[in-house]
Amino acid sequence: MNPKQMVLLACLYACVLILTLTTAQTNTNRTYTISKGDNITKPGCTKKCGNITVPYPFGIGSDCAFNMQFELSCNTSDDGSQKLILGINIMVYDISDTELRVENSISWRCYNSSGAVIDESLGWTRFIDSSPYSFSVLNRFTIVGCDDYGSITVPNNFEYGCNVSCTSRGDVIEGECMGKGCGQKHIPKGLKYYNTTMSSTENHTDVWSFNSCGYAFLGEADRFRFQGLPDLGDDLYASYFYDRIQASVPIVLDWAIGSLTCTQALKIENYACSENSHCIDSDTGLGGYRCSCNTGYHGNPYLNQGCQGSYNCSCPHGYTGDGKKDGRGCIAPSSKQFPWIKFSLGWCLYIPSGWNNLVLFQNQEKEID
Ligand SMILES: *[C@@H]1O[C@H](CO)[C@@H](O)[C@H](O)[C@H]1NC(C)=O
Ligand SMILES: *[C@@H]1O[C@H](CO)[C@@H](O)[C@H](O)[C@H]1NC(C)=O
Ligand SMILES: *[C@@H]1O[C@H](CO)[C@@H](O)[C@H](O)[C@H]1NC(C)=O
Ligand SMILES: *[C@@H]1O[C@H](CO)[C@@H](O)[C@H](O)[C@H]1NC(C)=O
Ligand SMILES: *[C@@H]1O[C@H](CO)[C@@H](O)[C@H](O)[C@H]1NC(C)=O
Ligand SMILES: *[C@@H]1O[C@H](CO)[C@@H](O)[C@H](O)[C@H]1NC(C)=O
Ligand SMILES: *[C@@H]1O[C@H](CO)[C@@H](O)[C@H](O)[C@H]1NC(C)=O
Ligand SMILES: *[C@@H]1O[C@H](CO)[C@@H](O)[C@H](O)[C@H]1NC(C)=O
Ligand SMILES: *[C@@H]1O[C@H](CO)[C@@H](O)[C@H](O)[C@H]1NC(C)=O
């Protein structure tokens, strides 16, 4: 192998490595890079409420958030435990780079043995159009019961509904949510409002002995597994299903800054992405964007100096230096002796634009010239 081929190979290897790192990042839905780093809030702001980390652009109190819509409150109860609250009363469990996990809101309809509705609560949630939140497609609308129709109505009066039925206890199978005692519907992306409707063909009169209530909720699909009879019955205690879902299945909200695309946002005054970061359009179809530290940098991209370089670059064989654009770069042993280097570097610079921040070889060109 001649030296030219070797440099080329090194370049290809580096490029493949970078590509792999990048792909790995975009495939992970639940990342917390905005919560990692020395500074994750504006100076002087509270980092945690209970055990929940609150990274900027979110903030507890008005001067701590990017704008009013990212303002959360931390409510301390009498026993000293703390709750992170969005809006008036939505409890927040978790904040990731792209999502918020919040408390569920379960709907139910219960009947007595002669088919009269004795208890009912039908949920609805609305985020105003200008709000940064929408329901993630990681949620599914789930309905549990043996004689129920449940649906959510979304703007434009489009209805996502599902019938569930079963005739005997033996009908329901644990872990199966395909219509026998449990059914699910996907929801459209970018949903900001829904309300729940429930009805029953026989008002549970045929199944009342083992199932007197129908339930419906929107929640993270991966967190829900149908338990079969225990979920349908009152055998354990009346609020078993409600308590179980409330405690274990959150609603996932997507969040984004504003409603402008990256291209549009770059031109405005309060563009949210700080230095060494780039803008990513939200994929909800509603507009809005998020920020991400450039490759080689880590931390909170919304904060001043939030993205800190932590990538250890390596120089091709024979070079010395730290490979960093703002460091010593890569220094050729002696450019005069290796006239082929320039040619090879030309190849390396074929790295797609946008990766400029980790073009390991850009430095070399500088050094050699
Ligand atoms: C990420 O989310 C998308 C849909 O939002 C899903 O199709 C994909 O499987 C998820 N990837 C991982 C690694 O969870
Ligand atoms: C980051 O936090 C440290 C200590 O909390 C502080 O000294 C420093 O000024 C902060 N940096 C920025 C850019 O806010
Ligand atoms: C916070 O505490 C609750 C209960 O104490 C626990 O269930 C939850 O997993 C904790 N969350 C984190 C992020 O540690
Ligand atoms: C906040 O805490 C107070 C008591 O300290 C309580 O009355 C109130 O309901 C709480 N608010 C929420 C949204 O949990
Ligand atoms: C069911 O409720 C209706 C209306 O409240 C009542 O008239 C009926 O007697 C109740 N049936 C039973 C079995 O309690
Ligand atoms: C639910 O939404 C539909 C369509 O917007 C509306 O007709 C209906 O009255 C709403 N129901 C409730 C309970 O808000
Ligand atoms: C649910 O069942 C009712 C009554 O059998 C029927 O009219 C309706 O079309 C069904 N809906 C769906 C979504 O299957
Ligand atoms: C079911 O309940 C609804 C609402 O209370 C009532 O209008 C309807 O007549 C009942 N149907 C039967 C079969 O009991
Ligand atoms: C980079 O190198 C330094 C010291 O050489 C080391 O402390 C640090 O952990 C390395 N960082 C990464 C991301 O490998």
Image: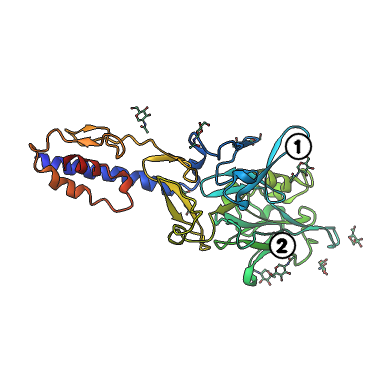
Type of amino acid at the residue the image marks with label 1:
Ser
Disc number at residue 77? Answer: 1
Q: Given contact means CB atoms under 8 Å apart, are the residues at marks 2 and 1 in contact?
A: no
Question: Ligand 4: does it lie within 8 Å of the C-beta at label 1?
Answer: yes
Please give the name of the residue rendered at 66% of the width and 53% of the height, measured from the top-left corner. 172
Give the crowd class for mark 2: few <14, some 14-19, many >=20 residues within 10 Å: many
Q: Classify the position of ligand 4 by quadrant: top left, top right, bottom left or bottom right.
A: top right
Give the residue at x 55% y 53%: 255
Does the residue tagged 2 have its C-beta within 8 Å of any atom of ligand 7? Answer: no
Q: Which mark is residue 148?
A: 2
Location of residue 319 with respect to 235 vertically, above or below: above
Sequence-first tag of 2 and 1: 1
Q: Quadrant of residue 191?
A: bottom right
Q: How is the image coloured?
A: rainbow
Circle 2: element type: strand
Q: Residue 63 at what x, y percent from top left?
A: 61, 44
Q: Nearer the viewer, residue 137 or 294?
A: 294
